[in-house]
C-alpha cells in the first residue's frame, strides 16, 4: 500500500462520497467462511440454500461486513485513526450472492473534537455496499481520530 500523507480530524471532508473499491465472493469462499464462522445451511449447502427464503447460496453478513470494512480502511489510509468506538445502524437490505461485484462507497458524516482529550476527536463514517444500483448493506463506524498537532 502506498503511504499517504497524514490526515487529521479537521481535514476530513464532510458528506463528500468516495469510492472504496469492490469485492466479489465465490461460492467456495462463502462456504469456507461459513464453515468456520457462520455455519448456517444457506451459507454452506447449495440445496439447502435453494430451499431457503434466499433461493440460493448467500454470504454471511459478518463476511460482507469484514470485506467492506477492509476496503474502507484501505481507502482512508492516512487518516490518523486511533481506534474504533462503535458500529452503528447495520442494515442488511439484500443478500450478498456469489460471483457478483459489490461496490463500497463511504462518506464522513460528522466530526467533533473530544471535550476531555484535546489531542483527538470523534469522526463518523457512513458506508454503503451496492449491488449495481441496489443497496445491499449500510452501516456506520465511529472512530477516534487524532487532531492535528500544535505547530
Image (spheres, helix red, strand yellow):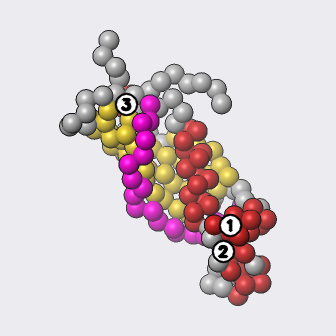
Q: Which quadrant of the structure image shows residue 81?
A: top left
Q: From what the image shows, is residue 115 above or below residue 26? A: above
Q: What are the residue bounds of the magenta stretch?
A: 80-100
- Residue 9 image offset from top left, x and y in percent: 36, 31
- Residue 97 image offset from top left, x and y in percent: 69, 67
Q: Which mark is residue 107?
A: none
Mark 2 vs mark 3: in front: 2
Identify residue for label 2. 39
Q: From what the image shows, is residue 48 above or below residue 19? A: below
Identify residue for label 1. 36
Specify whether residue 19 is in view: no
Specify whether residue 87 is in view: yes
Instruction: Look at the numbered disc 1 and give the secondary structure of its residue.
Output: helix
Instruction: Look at the numbered disc 3 and give the secondary structure of its residue.
Output: strand
Identify residue for label 3. 146
Instruction: Look at the numbered disc 2 and give the secondary structure of its residue.
Output: loop
- Residue 99 image offset from top left, x and y in percent: 76, 62
Amino acid at each position: 500500500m502506498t503511504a499517504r500523507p497524514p490526515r487529521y480530524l479537521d481535514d476530513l471532508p464532510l458528506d463528500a462520497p468516495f469510492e472504496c473499491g469492490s469485492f466479489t465472493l465465490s461460492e467456495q469462499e462463502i462456504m469456507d467462511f461459513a464453515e468456520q464462522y457462520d455455519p448456517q445451511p444457506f451459507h454452506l449447502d447449495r440445496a439447502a440454500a435453494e430451499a431457503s427464503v434466499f433461493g440460493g447460496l448467500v454470504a454471511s453478513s459478518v463476511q460482507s461486513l469484514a470485506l467492506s470494512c477492509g476496503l474502507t480502511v484501505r481507502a482512508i489510509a492516512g487518516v490518523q485513526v486511533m481506534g474504533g468506538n462503535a458500529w452503528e445502524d447495520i442494515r442488511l437490505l439484500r443478500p450478498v450472492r456469489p460471483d457478483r461485484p459489490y461496490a463500497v462507497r463511504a462518506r464522513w458524516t460528522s466530526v467533533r473534537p473530544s471535550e476531555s482529550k484535546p489531542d483527538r476527536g470523534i469522526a463518523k463514517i457512513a458506508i454503503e455496499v451496492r449491488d449495481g444500483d441496489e443497496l445491499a448493506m449500510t452501516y456506520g463506524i465511529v472512530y477516534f481520530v487524532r487532531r492535528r498537532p500544535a505547530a
